Image (spheres, rainbow, N blue to C red):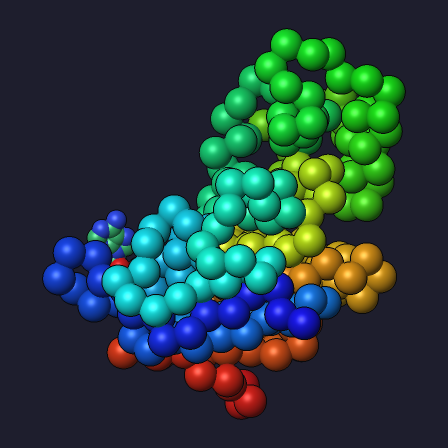
Amino acid sequence: MNVLEIQDLYFSYNRENVLSQINLSVEYGDYAGIIGSNGAGKSTLLKLILGVLKPSSGTIRLFGKDGCDPRDFRKIGYIPQNSAAFFGGFPATVEEVVKANLYSQLGFLRLPAKKHKVLVQQALETVGMQDCAKRRIGELSGGQQQRIMLARVLVAQPQILLLDEPVTGIDAQAAKSLYALLEQLNAEQGITILMVTHDVERAFRSAKHILHLNSSGVLEEDHDI
Ligand SMILES: Nc1ncnc2c1ncn2[C@@H]1O[C@H](COP(=O)(O)OP(=O)(O)OP(=O)(O)O)[C@@H](O)[C@H]1O
C-alpha cells in the first residue's frame, strides 16, 4: 500500500518550469533517496508533498487522500534544509526543543504530563542523545544537533520522515552514524523515509532505492552510482 502517490505532476514558480511529469510511488516501509543537481527542484518537490506549494497540474495523494490534510500533519516528520542551524540559535535546552514538537498533544496552556516526558526521553534515547537532555542545543556539534532534529520529529511518532539534506555540514563519521540510525528506524520501527540528498555514494548504500531528479525536472529510478 502506498503512503505517497504522485501522478503527472508539473510545477512552475511564476513562468519558470521546475518539475515536469513527476510520477512517484512510495510504499509504507520504503526508504527512498532523491538525488539531483543544485536547483533541480528537490526541495520544491518536498514542499509540494507537504502542501506548502500547490501543483501547476497533476495529483499528490498522501495517506490515501488528495493534497495534505492538516489533520495528517502529525504523521509527517519533516526536517527542512539547515534546520539544525536554525534551532541551534535558540536559547533552549535539548529537551525543550524536542518537547515543543508535542504542541498538537499539549495545547498552548497545558503543562506536559508524565507521558509527554516519557515520549521526549524515548525520542532522545532512540537517537542516542539522552545524556544531553539538559544541555543548550547551541552547545552541541552539528552532528549532535542533527540527531536532536531527528528526535524532535520522532517524538510526535510520525509514519513518514521527509528529510531535506540531513547530512549537510556534518563530518563523515557523524553522517555515517546518522545513516545507520535512519536504516534502523526504517528496519525496526517501519518508518517510511523519503530523503533528499547530495551524498550520492552513501545514499546508495543506505536507501532501498534511489530516484534521480534530472536538470529537466524529470524524476527517474537510478541504478548506477
Ligand atoms: N520561492 C521561489 N521562487 C522562485 N523560484 C524559486 C523559489 N524557490 C526555488 N526556486 C527556484 O526553483 C528551482 C528549484 O529549487 P529547489 O530549491 O527546489 O532546488 P534543489 O534541487 O532543492 O536545489 P539544492 O540542491 O541546491 O538545494 C531553482 O531554480 C530555484 O532558483
**Does 148 sit above or below residue 211?**
above
Q: How many numbered marks have been drawn onto this rendered protein structure?
A: 0
User: Is residue 53 rendered to the left or right of residue 27?
Assistant: left
User: Is residue 26 rendered to the left or right of residue 212?
Assistant: right
**Does 203 sit above or below residue 56?**
below
Work out whether residue 146 can be spotted: no
Horizontal and vertical percent position of residue 27: 65, 71
Asked where in the image residue 209 lies, by quadrant, the reply is: bottom right
Where the C terminus falls, by quadrant? bottom right
Pick the residue in front: 133 or 213.
213
Work out whether residue 98 can be spotted: yes
Asked where in the image residue 72 lies, by quadrant, the reply is: top right
Pick the residue in front: 154 or 29.
29
Horizontal and vertical percent position of residue 201: 58, 76
Question: Residue, x 50% and y 63% (percent of image)?
Answer: 61
Asked where in the image residue 156 lies, by quadrant, the reply is: top right
Q: Residue furthest left?
A: 15
**Does 186 sit above or below residue 74?**
below
Pick the residue in front: 102 or 173.
102
Question: Residue, x 84% and y 37% (percent of image)?
Answer: 122
Horizontal and vertical percent position of residue 21: 33, 78
Where the N terminus falls, by quadrant? bottom right
Question: Residue, x 36% and y 76% (percent of image)?
Answer: 8
Horizontal and vertical percent position of residue 56: 26, 62
